[in-house]
Each structure stands twice: as structure tokens, then as C-alpha cells.
Amino acid sequence: MRLHELDLAIGHKVALKIIGQDYRAHTFDAQMLGYQKGESVVLVPLAKPGQVLLRRGLEVTVEGTLPDSRFSFESVIDQVADSPFLHIHLEYPPGIRYQPVRRYPRVPVDTPVTVSAHTGLGMTTRAIGGYMLDVSYGGARLVLEKELTAMVTKITIDVMLASPEMEREVTLAAQVRNRSTPVTDYPRCQFAYGVAFMALGDTEALFLRGFCLQEQLRHRVLPLTD
């Protein structure tokens, strides 16, 4: 598979892995500035470690994620430029490693949610605030202000999903599938979960499919002109 087949968006965040001057592997974030198919890939390093000296000929590994997959490739720095800001040109990779990770692609949403948790004994907790970070037709990732205990068998999520062409407040029933790592952007929400939606009503199912499809298309990426 070739890099341009991913349609990465300008500004897409990736991870750079580089051996530093201390002979240790360092990983730090970078953003995709663009690419010229078959020629080069342009990245903007973010928060580069001091032990890493960017120079021509330095080998790098680039890793990234998409809503439904992971990818990575090896390359070599071809040019380092400081103007108008620090950016690097990598040799265009002959191929990439690509691994699908989800049945349904997820799209970023970053929207508030209210969650009610239900136990197997028929008890319902008080509403828990939080955020939905991404969503697909099959599930979502949430960060919450309070922990969901082992007694919780089902949750109800109230959320407003909005895009330029559609918006709707929906109520979604879900089961917790896994715990994930909290994100620093939400210091009050220290509990993160991956959830799978249960049977959706016809209206919610139709809206969710349309919303996810539109957001996937909206986040498709334009490469630099060949």
C-alpha cells in the first residue's frame, strides 16, 4: 500500500521515532504538512526532545492512526528547514504497513455527554458528565468524571451530534467493552472507556450512519499538488 492511498489530512498527527544522540529511541509528535506523491513527505515536529538532532540522512520511523486503522513506515530525512518554522522533508516511502483495527471507522467528535449507568439489579446511577471523543456506527470512546463500577451492565448516553449538514440529540444504549487511557485535555475526566452500542432504534441507527459517513468524508485529506 502507498502513503497517498490513505488520503491523510493536512495537520494529521503522527508519531516520529528517532535514535537520539544518546543512542536511545525517542518518540515525539509531528504533524503532516503535506506530501508530493513519489517525491517527499513534509512533517512539522512538535516538542522535539533535546537529545534528537534533526539532520539530513537520519533514519526515522513514522507511525499514525486513522479512525479504522494503524499505519507506519520507515524513511530518511532529506532536508531540514527552519523557515518559516521548523519542518522536515522525508524521502517518500515505497510502501507502508497498514492494519485495520475496527469493523466500523470512528470519527472524532469531542462533544459533551451525559451518562446514566444501570446495574444488573435494576439500579440507575446519577447522571455522570463527560465527553465523547470519537464515534462510529458500532461504538464510541468516552471520558467520564466518575468511574463505572463492575456492577454496571449497561449505560445510556445522551449526546448532541452535530456536523455542518445535520445535528440531532440522541440517546444511545451501550455496554462497556474496555478501559482506556485518560487524555490530558480533560483533567476532570479521569476515567476513559471504549463502549459498544446495543440495539439502536431505526431513527438513531439511520442518523448515526449518516452522521459517521458525512464526518468520514469531511475529514478526508487533500494531498499537495503533484
Image (cartoon, rainbow, N blue to C red):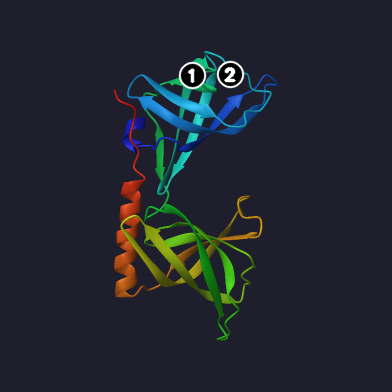
Q: Secondary structure at mark 2?
A: loop
Disc marking residue 187:
none
The residue carrying mark 1 is 76
10 Å crowding of disc 1: few (<14), some (14-19), many (20+): some
Residue 207 locus on image (x, y percent): 32, 66
Left or right of 91? Residue 80 is right
Above or below: residue 9 compared with residue 121: above
The residue carrying mark 2 is 54
Residue 167 quadrant: bottom left
10 Å crowding of disc 2: few (<14), some (14-19), many (20+): some
Mark count: 2
Residue 215 locus on image (x, y percent): 35, 52
The residue depicted at 60 percent of the width and 32 percent of the height is 27
The residue depicted at 51 percent of the width and 73 percent of the height is 155
- Given residues 209 and 64, the one toward you in this image is 209
Residue 23 locus on image (x, y percent): 67, 21
Amino acid tagged 1 = Val
Left or right of 198? Residue 48 is right
Closer to the chain start, of discs 2 and 1, is 2
Left or right of 89? Residue 207 is left
The residue depicted at 70 percent of the width and 21 percent of the height is 22
State how far apart marks 2 and 1 are (Cα). 11 Å
The answer to whether residue 37 of the structure is visible from this angle is yes
Residue 8 locus on image (x, y percent): 38, 37
Residue lying furthest bottom in this view? 122
Amino acid tagged 2 = Leu
The residue depicted at 38 percent of the width and 52 percent of the height is 105
Q: Secondary structure at mark 1?
A: strand
The answer to whether residue 2 of the structure is visible from this angle is no
Left or right of 157? Residue 125 is right
